[in-house]
Image: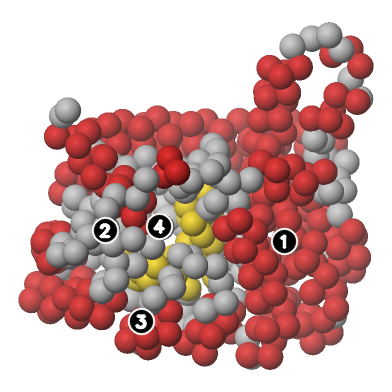
Amino acid sequence: MTDVKALAQERQQMFVNVYRGKIPTRIPINSILSLEACIEYAGANQAEVLWDMTKAEPIFEKVNTDFPADTPAGGTRRYPSFYQILGSRPFVMSSEGVMQHPNVQGMEPEDYDDFIAAPYDTMIEKIYPRLYTELDTDPNTKALILAKAMRAHGDEFALLAQIGARMRAKFGFASIPSSATTAPFDFLADFLRSFTGICSDIRRYPDKVIAACEALTPILIKKGKLPVPSKIGVTSIPLHMGPYLRTKDFEKFYWPSLKKQVEVLTEMGINVSLFVEHDFMRFLDHLSELPENTILRFEYGDPKLVSEKLGSKFIISGFYPVMLLHTGTKEQCIDKAKELIDILAPGGRYIFNTDKGAMDMHGNITENLKAVIEFVREYGKYDNPDEPYDLSKDPMPPAEKIVAEIEANLNSKYYQTWEQYRANHPELEGRPQEVIAKKIKKLEDDMFNFIINLGS
């Protein structure tokens, strides 16, 4: 067995143990550098790499070599190619080549009733032509634009997957399926109604906001499904709007749909990773209601309080101030890592990560990050690790069954289950149904995921 394969197995088992609430051999270390930071570190042109990700592979090789975390430096889902084709308003490239998100609105208050009845269809028919100007055209041109954009989206992510596979093989990274979705209230607020629009709606149309979140919840559960069946995998959900709401509004509008979403994804056998953005300290009791081993990455707060209230049930991450890496001395950075490890690591439910990703490489981050990774790798070894958790004893979770039920009740003329498709195509009788079904289903889901990604 080569050293790289042994390292991959070690890392795989380390994450498996953490995800199952067992003490690993040492603390896992997440990569903290955004794609933008990676490009800057390599001295490349931001816009050029984002438009041509074949140029990213040597960049990832350099970053993974120089900053040897336990997860690879990653890409992004904000590629300019498909946004340009669509005439995007929600995401535009700055003069420096960075993809930025203005405060835009694609849904009007009068759209609520249609959205509640059929959210997927309303996005396609009404909302997206307002957010993506090239879709505001005749049906034939709209179909061609959407086809080109989806092809560009698929090409970008296929290339990223190929690069990722080569990085795993070269650097010994674990192979853990991952996905991402959005909290229902955040999905409604981010692009559809906008920050300002949703703040008005919870006063003017409270029942409609609640109903819209309920209508979105199954769609965003389906969006969080892992790309391949797995007993171990992670779906990420960033939490945006919660801290900006009064507690009673958080409990009324934000929390019920998010809680249900996390519970169902967990039932599907997925480790849900919540990026707990901004100040969630007044909502710790709410977070305590979530399923065991949910991953909570905190941007802000009191790590001692979080450890006391949540550390025995959940996997804690974050808290480390990325700005300290930019501005602090090496000694200050290592001291902060030690402080957080001493508070959060006992019991094994801890993954080292910063409070947010590094967007650039200004200041002292290059040398400080190298020193912190080296320190955490050595200081973060456990004296009493549990036995390697054996995934083979776990049954395959019922993810496919849960998602199939969601799909059967989507109430959309733009999404067909295989059963619905087959009923409309009697010419397929006697053909290799199993093979055909797999391909038709994949294409249907590829389009679904593309459409939902455009709204988040």
Helix, strand or loop at mark 4: helix
Q: Is residue 194 visible?
A: no
Q: Residues within 10 Å of mark 4 (few under 14, many from 20)?
A: many
Question: Which residue, given by chain and number where applicable, does mark 2 sit on?
Answer: 386
Q: Position of residue 394 (x, y in %)?
A: 48, 46
Q: Residues within 10 Å of mark 3 (few under 14, many from 20)?
A: many
Question: Which residue, given by chain and number where applicable, does mark 1 sit on?
Answer: 217
Q: Residue type at mark 3: give it.
A: Ser
Q: Position of residue 417 (x, y in %)?
A: 80, 35
* Sequence-first disc among 1 and 4: 4
Q: How far is the residue under mark 2 from the one under mark 3?
A: 20 Å
Labels 2, 1: front one: 2
Question: Which residue, given by chain and number where applicable, does mark 3 sit on?
Answer: 307
Q: Residue at x 64, y 70 (%)?
A: 259
Labels 3 & 1 near each other (Cβ < 8 A):
no
Q: Residue at x 66, y 30 (%)?
A: 442
**433 versus 102 height, above or below:** above
| Front residue of 261 and 446 | 261
* Sequence-first disc among 2 and 3: 3
Q: How far is the residue under mark 4 from the one under mark 2?
A: 13 Å
Q: How far is the residue under mark 1 from the one under mark 4?
A: 24 Å
* Sequence-first disc among 4 and 2: 4
When asked about the image quadrant of residue 34, the answer is bottom left
Helix, strand or loop at mark 2: loop
Q: Is residue 307 visible?
A: yes
